[in-house]
Image: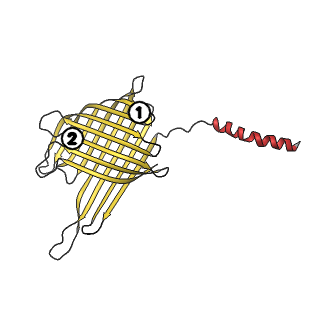
């Protein structure tokens, strides 16, 4: 009799376990998610140089609200030419940082429309501008979304504040800002992203800004990813002696927590 009970328990136990597991409620998605990004390149040989790129991203989602905060920093040091005594020193050839914050509020019954507020600030030691800041607010829409792809875009009026490097003169201009973000997952490990933003000055002759970042992210382990990115920054009006287009190619590790 005991043997029959033992056999019955043996066969029923997996079914009981499966039922208990199946009825467990799914884990709630955390309101806050964040990631840290770091890349480092040190070159030796005829020329020595050191590059460091770091970033921090924070996202908060609750109800109809969605907020993002992104901080990026890049510094580069290159060995200078030897002086009369043959001594060489490292000099900074690139040093910049930027911060971008945006909050979206979903409107409408479909949940595909949203109102947004966007704030951006950038400082680049070697650009034509000592600093560039902007604020914009407007309307956005989720134009396309599937299990593997999505496309968001928004547009709105705003204001831009620039400080030139040579003269330290400041200027405030009205702008129209347009943003777009396309993402596509090739599989559960590889994701492609294309981001574009335009801050178009409404007055002729004033500086307009266009930025693009193309990236491919590959998951290495649960919380660690490898990211390849190409960033292009373009200013329509720059001072003499400065380039209007800057490009940045990077490979960084991302830790999600």
Q: Give the percent coordinates (x, y) of residue 256.
A: 45, 49
Horizontal side of residue 73 vs 5, given as left or right = left
Looking at the image, which residue sits at the far top?
109
Seen in the picture, residue 178 relative to 121 is either above or below; the reply is: above
Q: Quadrant of residue 107?
A: top left
SS class, disc 2: strand
* Sequence-first disc among 2 and 1: 1
Q: Is residue 210 left or right of residue 149?
A: left
- From what the image shows, is residue 11 above or below residue 127? above
Q: Which residue is mark 2?
A: 209
Residue 178 location in percent, x, y? Answer: 27, 34
224 or 148: which is nearer to us? 148
Looking at the rendered image, the quarter that the N terminus falls into is top right
Mark 1 is surrounded, within 10 Å at the Cα level, by few (under 14), some (14 to 19) or many (20 or more) other residues, namely: some
Furthest-bottom residue in view?
85
Q: Nearer the viewer, residue 240 or 257?
A: 240
Residue drawn at x 80%, y 40% is 8
| Residue at (20, 47) in percent of width and height | 245
Residue 78 x, y percent position in the rendering = 24, 63
Question: Relative to 190, does residue 151 appear above or below in the rendering?
Answer: above
Q: Which mark is residue 65?
A: 1
Question: Which residue is pictured at 64% across the width and 36% down the height?
Answer: 22
Mark seen at residue 225 = none
* Nearer to me, 216 or 27: 216
């Amino acid at each position: 009799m005991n043997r029959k009970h033992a056999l019955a328990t043996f066969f029923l136990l997996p079914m009981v376990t499966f039922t208990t597991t199946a009825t467990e409620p799914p884990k709630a998605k955390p309101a806050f998610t964040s990631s840290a990004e770091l890349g480092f390149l040190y070159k030796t040989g005829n020329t020595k140089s050191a590059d460091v790129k770091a970033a921090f991203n924070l996202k908060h989602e609750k109800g109809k609200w969605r907020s993002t905060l992104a901080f990026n920093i890049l510094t580069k040091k290159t060995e200078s030419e030897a002086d009369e005594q043959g001594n060489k020193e490292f000099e900074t050839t690139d040093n910049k940082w930027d911060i971008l914050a945006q909050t979206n509020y979903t409107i409408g019954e479909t949940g595909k429309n949203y109102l947004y507020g966007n704030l951006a600030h950038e400082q680049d030691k070697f650009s034509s501008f000592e600093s560039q800041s902007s604020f914009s607010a407007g309307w956005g829409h989720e134009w396309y979304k599937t299990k593997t792809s999505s496309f968001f875009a928004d547009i709105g009026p705003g204001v831009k504040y620039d400080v030139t490097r040579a003269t330290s003169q400041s200027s405030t201009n009205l702008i129209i800002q347009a943003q777009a973000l396309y993402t596509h997952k090739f599989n559960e490990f590889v994701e492609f992203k294309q981001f574009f933003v335009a801050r178009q000055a409404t007055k002729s002759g004033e500086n307009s800004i266009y930025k693009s970042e193309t990236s491919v992210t590959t998951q290495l382990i649960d919380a660690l990813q490898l990211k390849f990115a190409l960033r292009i920054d373009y200013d329509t009006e720059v001072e003499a002696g400065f380039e209007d287009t800057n490009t940045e190619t990077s490979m960084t590790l991302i830790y999600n927590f």
